[in-house]
Amino acid sequence: MPTVNVFYNQNKPDFDLLTSNIKTHLVGKLSNKDIVLTAEEISVRFLQVEGKGMIGSVEIEITAHEFEKRVKEQDEICRSLRDNLMKNFPQLGDIRVWLILSQLGHSW
């Protein structure tokens, strides 16, 4: 199950709207012939950061299992989510997105 950590330090996002947007966007981008995700299978977490060490005003880390399609499209996945959020939530400022793909993992 993919997890999404949203780090912010100044502009507190609308958690419900942002969560819905992220889940809807990533369902299509992270699904493939091996696994078809639903929005309920993506966990979104918000973490408020103290200090001024962040690169963007909002930083997003997506962690998911490695599949060939995700590896090939990793830059597109990050760019498309960033573009989507900056268009729909301009009040958040500069958004940076990372995709972390792992080979092993366990849930539950």
Image (cartoon, grey):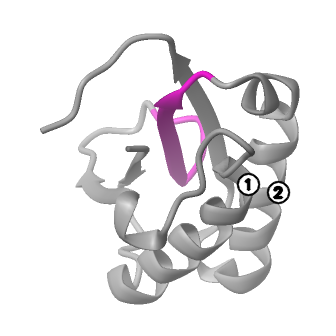
Q: Earlier in the sequence, mark 2 or mark 1?
A: 1
- Is 56 a magenta residue? yes
Q: Which class describes the residues within 10 Å of circle 2: few (<14), some (14-19), or many (20+)?
A: some
Residue 44 or 40: which is nearer the viewer? 40
Helix, strand or loop at mark 1:
helix
Q: In the image, is residue 102 above or below residue 33?
A: above
Indicate the quadrant where residue 71 lies.
top right
Quarter holding the N terminus is top left
The residue that appears at 52% across and 46% down in the rendered structure is 59
Q: Amino acid at mark 1?
A: Lys
Is 88 positioned to the left or the right of 75 in the image? left
Residue 84 position, x and y percent, is 77, 71
The magenta span reads 54-66
The residue that appears at 74% across and 32% down in the rendered structure is 70
Residue 62 or 69: which is nearer the viewer? 69
Q: In the image, is residue 61 above or below residue 22?
A: above
Residue 71 or 100: which is nearer the viewer? 71
Residue 21 position, x and y percent, is 57, 79
The residue that label 2 is drawn on is 80
| CA separation in Å, label 2 and label 1 | 9 Å
The residue that appears at 21% across and 34% down in the rendered structure is 107
Residue 87 position, x and y percent, is 79, 79
Quarter holding the C terminus is top left
Contact between marks 2 and 1 (CB within 8 A): the answer is yes
Residue 81 position, x and y percent, is 72, 59
Is 41 positioned to the left or the right of 92 in the image? left
The residue that appears at 49% across and 11% down in the rendered structure is 103
Q: In the image, is residue 20 above or below residue 85?
A: below
Q: Amino acid at mark 2?
A: Ser
The residue that label 1 is drawn on is 29
Q: In the image, is residue 21 above or below residue 61?
A: below
